[in-house]
Amino acid sequence: MTSALRSLFLVNILTMLRIPLTVLFIYFTNLFIVEQAAVAGNISLFISVIIISTDLLDGILARKYLVVTRFGQIFDVICDFFYILFSLFLFNYYEIISKYIICVVIYKFIEFIIFSMLYDDPIQKKETVFLFDIPGRFTSALYYLLPSIQVLYLLKCIDKFKIINIIYLTILFFSFISSVIKFNNIRFSRYIIKK
C-alpha cells in the first residue's frame, strides 16, 4: 500500500468514525436525559469532543497529505449532517430544543447543496465540491457545537437563557447573512457566464 493510499485510508476512517460515535453520543445523551446519570452526560460530552476533533483532523490530514477527494468531501458533509441532525432530533424529542432550529439546519443544508451545485467557479471547483462562505462556515461550526452546548446545559454548566438563546439568535443571523451571500454569488456567477 502506497503512502498516499494509507493517508487516504486514514482520513476516510476518521470521517467514518463519526457515524458510530454519533450513535454512541445519542445513546449516552438519551441515557443521561432519561436517568439523569451525570456520568452518561460526561461521556456524551467527551464523545462530542471526539466527533468535533475527528472532523477537524480529517480535513487537516487530507490537505496535508494531498488526498482531498470528491468522495471524501461529500462523505465528510454527510457525516457532519448525520451528527448534527440526529443529535438535534434527540433534543427535540425531549423538548429541549425547538423544531424551528432543526428546520433552519435542514434548510441551510439543502441550500448549501443546491447552491454548491449551481455556483460556477472553475477555480474553486478544482479545489472543492462545495461552495463555502465565511458566515456559512461560522454558522455550521455553531450547528456542530450545538449538541455539546445542549449537553453542557443539561449538566447545568451553562445557563440556557444566557448562552443558548444567544447562540440561537447568532445562528439565525449568520444563516440569513450566509443565504444572502450565496444568492449574490450565484447571481454574480450567472452574470459572468453570460458575458
Image: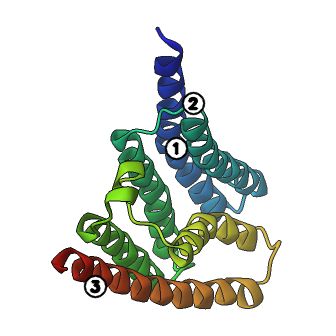
Q: Which residue is more in the foreground, 184 or 7? A: 184
Sequence-wise, the earlier of marks 1 and 3 is 1
Q: Secondary structure at mark 3?
A: helix
Task: Identify the residue shown where x is 73% and y is 74%.
Answer: 153
Residue 162 on image: x %, y %: 76, 90
Residue mark closest to the camera, 2 vs 1: 2
Q: Residue at x 36, y 73 (%)?
A: 106
Secondary structure, mark 1, is helix
Q: Residue furthest left?
A: 194
Crowding around mark 3 (Cα neighbors within 10 Å: few <14, some 14 to 19, many 20+) is few
Q: Earlier in the sequence, mark 3 or mark 2?
A: 2
Q: Is residue 113 left or right of residue 159?
A: left
The amino acid marked with disc number 2 is: Tyr
Image point (64%, 66%), residue name: 145
Q: Assess whether mark 3 and mark 1 are in contact (beta carbons under 8 angstroms).
A: no
Q: Quadrant of residue 161?
A: bottom right
Q: CA distance from mark 3 to mark 2?
A: 35 Å
State left or right for residue 46 relative to residue 21. Answer: right
Q: Secondary structure at mark 2?
A: loop
Sequence-wise first label, 2 or 1: 1
**Circle 2 residues within 10 Å: few <14, some 14–19, many ≥20:** some
**Circle 1 residues within 10 Å: few <14, some 14–19, many ≥20:** many
Checking the image for residue 187, the label placed there is: 3
User: Which one is nearer the viewer's eye here, 57 or 130?
Assistant: 130
The image's mark for residue 18 is 1
Q: Are marks 3 and 2 in contact (CB under 8 Å)?
A: no
Where residue 31 appears, x then y in whole percent? 61, 55
Say which amino acid is labelled 1: Arg
Q: Amino acid at mark 3?
A: Arg
Q: Which mark is residue 65?
A: 2
> Eyeballing the image, is 93 above or below 22?
below
